[in-house]
Image: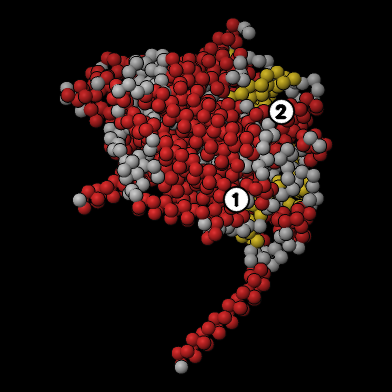
């Protein structure tokens, strides 16, 4: 009898607990369930410094926001995954994050190919995807869909219109020769540079367009042709990193820096100079764009952020970390404004939103979900004050360096 | 198209070719004797460039630090090559070529990751060393002295290797093992150690190239991949295992690239592979190789 | 020297093997019921990859033809479907059916040139052709989208449902694997194995080995094309790296991991490779080191792969019992 009674009590208790559990906990859980951001980036391999820097920027924002009470009473959680620079892996991780981890938002990565794959999936899964570094204009133009947002600049101010406006406002060169790596970013960059520059300086000419296989570092043949071409300006089409350093050294050795003006869009990025030492070669005198000249911007928030990134990653703050930081704050602002993480409501909140960041007010353009992030340009120089080459005589560009809405309409065939 | 411009482009093509020869020759030698398609050749080059950077920087206040690095770094790479050959390749010589190919692929993964762990993901720079910091006037061009130095080095390495292979007893042993392994073994040659020696020589050459080219370019991750396919193309065109073939193949590729940039820039990218396929179809042992 | 392993190809014959097959099939068919959607998606990917590996192994393990360029034909299949869907506006059926046709065609042309050469030169030719395919894809922006790839392909919504896509893939891969199994165990397949063992001897008995090798090449290309097409439909996008030599090396690694002399080798190899890289990558960003180490271990210690080594042990155990 005793045992049966014990069993009965146990059974009733179990049923009671189960009922309580089923009915009460969801409400309790919802209040504590974190808002999950899936962060996909290239965390391994040769260009992993971008992924590492960006994830640091995102983490700093998440930590700050959580310290301040979170968003709508919920904590933010960042889940970081490696795309191994492969669209297949990036897609797999995006699916995993959405299906298994049930993230509320996706963000990342550096490679436009991977970003396109993720964006494609996001549009079908109806999840918001915030592009982090990938520059391809396709994502907000030809391949636009309502679930993609970009707070970073895109290829237009970076490789195309930005350098074109910069050149038109400084040297106004008339005979330009271009040298690029033979891939889409290079070809597209040159195309946009040409169309803007020839619009601003109509009597200028692009006298030749030279290409080298992507990743190559020996430009001797092209440089020789350039030296004999009579050009007064060289435009580098999407050659970055080690290739850019190689070009700089070779061009200097061939005396090109004395003969003509250099437009090197990627040179301003801080990632290029993470191991630079005083006395090393550098593109002094080159006209370049920079996406986050942290040393030149005022304000203690900027300085505090720069310091935090340096502490966390031992690297100087890059625009990747800046944009990841801004993106997370944008998510916070939009969710707060929308009052929930419901995708459609957040989209409405984001469109037309103006972020107050420490690089200025940044408006999110509703038409293409591209934020009008500023780009800066200047002349590369080396000063003893800073441990890396940097732009001087800095000017800021804004919305004018992006495609206009009419242009995008035409591109989309509308 | 002035004569000067053409001449300038030609000397640039030769410079390109000599650099490629320096980078690719090790692969040719290794394949010639060991019959191994060493995918890790680019990785050894990269390892050489990082080691050279390390030595140059560590000895920075010393004058001539770069030249000391050129002495030391290739030896380090040769040592690594020796270890690879003895412990990883020796056990699988009897196995099919597929295993060697994939093993060297595994080495590509490992060496790249090790370089990243030790030196980080950012790129590094080695400066052009004294006394080649300046430039000369050549055919109306400002031509860097260092490139002239590289052209000379290419020729020196080529002739040095020819001397070694054709006019020394060591070279005779290598040639014997290359032509007929069993016979050489029967005649008392210690074939395994000859193999090791040749692999170390090839690695040493890769390491040397890793010291010589970066002052004009950069020390970066990803240089292994960038270099290895071009090496394969050159070695196939010239003839697997032929020293002169590698030299010829490199010069041909250098000149076609230089002239291609001048006249048909759009096609330049695919040139190498197309040449490779044509040679493999009509004369697979390459221009100066020997048919099997 | 490879032994004829058709006997213990499936780690046993007759009843044990049949039971395993049935069990496996049952598990796969009911997978979506007990495993999350994310895993169903990964399994779909693994099925596609295993078909590609199996296709490669027709050449590699059964004919003894070492190809360094299977990725090229895989990419041809994927891009054919993508281009038909997006640029030509055709519906899904012809787009998918065209993939093995084009891959087989290109495989026939490339193969005809390649089989004229042996061993190293054959391998280098396959590598060169694969890189040419990569270059064409990379450069021909108007048709292939260049290095941006082709994305947001007009794939019917049916395939976006993960379970639907999974069952479709399972069906196609199952049928193709069965067909490959039948081919391997046919007289044609026997001839291939004989050619692998001793080409000259087979020539002496009057067989045109080149024709058989070309046949293996074309069959391999056909199924590589199908797997490429399946991946295109699964992911909705295609990229040039599908054709790069690193992807070819990955496929070779998969076959070696599992074992090239067993039919189930490539299938098991895919499973191990996918899970291993995923698990290791979750723990460390230095997963390249571990992958490289594992490959070296397999090549030095377990050259016949996991399945091959297990089959060896099983066979030895049976011998001891006798």
Apparent side of residue C283 relative to residue A200 in the rendered image (left or right):
left
* Residue B221 in view, yes or no: yes
Crowding at label 2, few (<14), some or many (≥20) Cα neighbours within 10 Å? some
Residue beneath the point at 52% across and 57% down: C30
Chain ID of residue with mark 2: A
Percent across and percent down for residue A149 are 71, 47
Residue beneath the point at 56% across and 54% down: C38
Residue beneath the point at 73% across and 42% down: A144
Q: Can you tell which of label 2 and label 1 is closer to the viewer?
A: 1
Residue beneath the point at 19% across and 25% down: B185
Residue tagged 1? C164
Percent across and percent down for residue B135 are 54, 18
Q: Is residue B46 above or below residue A130?
A: above
Residue tagged 2? A191
Crowding at label 1, few (<14), some or many (≥20) Cα neighbours within 10 Å? few
Task: Pick whichever, A329 or A234, lies toward us.
Answer: A329
Percent across and percent down for residue C59 are 41, 32
Percent across and percent down for residue B18 are 46, 19
Q: Real-space Cα distance between discs 2 and 1?
A: 42 Å
- In terms of secondary structure, where does tag 1 sit? helix
- In terms of secondary structure, where does tag 2 sit? helix
Residue located farthest toward the right when viewing the structure as drawn? A406
Apparent side of residue C173 relative to residue C236 in the rendered image (left or right):
left
């Amino acid at each position: 009898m005793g045992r049966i009674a014990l069993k009965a009590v146990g059974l009733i208790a179990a049923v009671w607990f189960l009922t309580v559990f089923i009915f009460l906990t969801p409400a309790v859980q919802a209040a504590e369930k974190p808002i999950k951001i899936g962060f996909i980036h290239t965390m391994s391999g040769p260009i992993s410094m971008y992924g590492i820097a960006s994830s640091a920027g995102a983490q700093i924002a998440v930590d700050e926001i959580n310290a301040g009470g979170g968003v709508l009473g919920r904590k933010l959680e960042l889940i970081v995954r490696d795309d191994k620079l492969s669209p297949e892996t990036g897609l797999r991780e995006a699916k995993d994050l959405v299906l298994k981890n049930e993230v509320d938002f996706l963000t990342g990565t550096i490679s436009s190919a991977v970003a396109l794959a993720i964006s494609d999936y996001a549009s079908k899964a109806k999840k918001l995807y915030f592009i982090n570094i990938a520059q391809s204009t396709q994502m907000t133009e030809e391949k636009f869909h309502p679930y993609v947002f970009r707070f970073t600049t895109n290829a237009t101010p970076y490789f195309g219109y930005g350098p074109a406006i910069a050149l038109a406002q400084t040297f106004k060169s008339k005979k330009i020769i271009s040298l690029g790596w033979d891939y889409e970013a290079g070809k597209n960059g040159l195309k946009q540079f040409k169309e803007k520059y020839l619009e601003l300086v109509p009597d200028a000419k692009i006298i030749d367009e030279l290409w080298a296989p992507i990743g190559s570092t020996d430009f001797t043949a092209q440089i020789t042709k350039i030296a004999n071409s009579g050009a007064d300006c060289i435009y580098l089409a999407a050659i970055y990193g080690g290739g850019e350093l190689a070009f700089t050294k070779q061009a200097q050795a061939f005396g090109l820096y004395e003969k003509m003006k250099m437009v090197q869009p990627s040179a301003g990025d801080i990632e290029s100079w993470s191991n630079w030492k005083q006395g090393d070669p550098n593109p002094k005198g080159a006209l370049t764009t920079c996406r986050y000249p942290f040393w030149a911007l005022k304000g203690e928030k900027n300085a505090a952020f720069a310091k935090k990134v340096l502490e966390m990653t031992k690297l100087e703050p890059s625009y990747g970390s800046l944009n990841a930081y801004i993106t997370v704050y944008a998510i916070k602002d939009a969710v707060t404004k929308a009052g929930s993480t419901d995708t459609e409501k957040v989209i409405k909140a984001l469109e037309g939103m103006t972020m107050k960041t420490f690089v200025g007010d940044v408006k999110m353009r509703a038409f293409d979900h591209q934020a009008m992030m500023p780009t800066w340009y200047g002349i590369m120089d080396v000063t003893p004050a800073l441990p890396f080459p940097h732009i001087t005589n800095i000017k800021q560009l804004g919305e004018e360096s992006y495609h206009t809405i009419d242009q995008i309409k035409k591109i989309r065939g509308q | 198209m002035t004569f000067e411009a053409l001449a300038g482009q030609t000397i640039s093509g030769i410079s390109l070719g000599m650099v490629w020869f320096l980078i690719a020759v090790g692969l040719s030698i290794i394949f010639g004797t060991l019959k191994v398609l060493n995918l890790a050749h680019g990785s050894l080059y990269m390892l050489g460039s990082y080691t050279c950077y390390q030595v140059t920087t560590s000895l920075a206040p010393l004058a001539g630090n770069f030249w000391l690095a050129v002495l030391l770094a290739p030896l380090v790479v040769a040592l690594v090559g020796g270890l690879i050959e003895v412990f990883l390749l020796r056990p699988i010589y009897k196995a099919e070529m597929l295993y060697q190919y994939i093993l060297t692929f595994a080495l590509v993964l490992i060496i790249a990751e090790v370089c990243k762990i030790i030196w980080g993901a950012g790129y590094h720079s080695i400066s052009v060393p004294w006394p080649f910091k300046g430039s000369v006037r050549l055919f109306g061009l400002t031509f860097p002295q260092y490139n002239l130095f590289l052209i000379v080095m290419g020729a020196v390495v080529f002739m040095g290797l020819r001397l070694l292979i054709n006019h020394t007893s060591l070279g005779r042993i290598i040639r014997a093992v290359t032509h007929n392994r069993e016979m050489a073994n029967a005649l008392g040659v210690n074939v395994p150690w000859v193999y090791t020696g040749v692999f170390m020589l090839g690695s040493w050459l890769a390491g040397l190239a890793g010291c010589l080219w970066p002052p004009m370019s950069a020390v970066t991750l990803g240089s292994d991949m960038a270099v290895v396919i071009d090496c394969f193309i050159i070695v196939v065109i010239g003839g697997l295992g032929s020293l002169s073939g590698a030299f010829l193949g490199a010069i041909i590729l250098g000149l076609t690239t230089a002239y291609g940039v001048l006249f048909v820039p759009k096609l330049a990218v695919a040139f190498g592979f197309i040449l490779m396929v044509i040679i493999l179809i009509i004369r697979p042992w390459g221009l100066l190789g020997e048919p099997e | 020297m490879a032994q004829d392993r058709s006997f213990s190809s499936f780690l046993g014959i007759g009843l044990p093997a049949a039971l395993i097959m049935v069990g496996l099939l049952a598990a796969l068919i009911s997978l979506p019921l007990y495993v999350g959607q994310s895993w169903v998606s990964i399994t779909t990917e693994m099925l596609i990859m295993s078909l590609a590996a199996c296709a490669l192994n027709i050449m590699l393990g059964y004919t003894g033809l070492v190809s360094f360029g299977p990725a090229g034909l895989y990419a041809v299949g994927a891009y054919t479907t993508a281009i038909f869907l997006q640029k030509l506006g055709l519906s899904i059926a012809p787009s998918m059916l065209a993939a093995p046709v084009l891959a087989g065609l290109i495989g026939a042309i490339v193969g005809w040139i390649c089989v004229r050469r042996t061993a190293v030169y054959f391998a280098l030719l396959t590598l060169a052709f694969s890189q040419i395919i990569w270059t064409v894809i990379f450069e021909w922006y108007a048709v292939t989208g260049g290095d941006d790839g082709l994305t947001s392909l007009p794939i019917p919504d049916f395939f976006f449902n993960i379970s639907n896509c999974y069952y479709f893939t399972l069906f196609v891969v199952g049928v193709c694997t069965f067909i490959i199994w039948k081919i391997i165990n046919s007289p044609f397949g026997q001839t291939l194995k004989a050619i692998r063992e001793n080409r000259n001897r087979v020539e002496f008995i009057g067989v045109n080995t080149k024709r058989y090798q070309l046949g293996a090449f074309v069959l391999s290309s056909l199924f590589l094309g199908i797997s490429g097409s399946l991946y295109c439909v699964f992911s909705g996008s295609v990229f040039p790296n599908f054709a790069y030599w690193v992807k070819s090396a990955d496929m070779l690694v998969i076959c070696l991991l599992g074992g090239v002399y067993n039919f189930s080798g490539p299938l098991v190899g895919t499973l191990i490779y996918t899970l291993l890289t995923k698990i290791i990558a979750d723990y460390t960003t230095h997963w390249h080191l571990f992958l490289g180490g594992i490959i070296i271990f397999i090549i030095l210690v377990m050259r016949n792969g996991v399945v091959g080594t297990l089959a060896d042990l099983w066979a030895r155990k049976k011998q001891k019992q006798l």
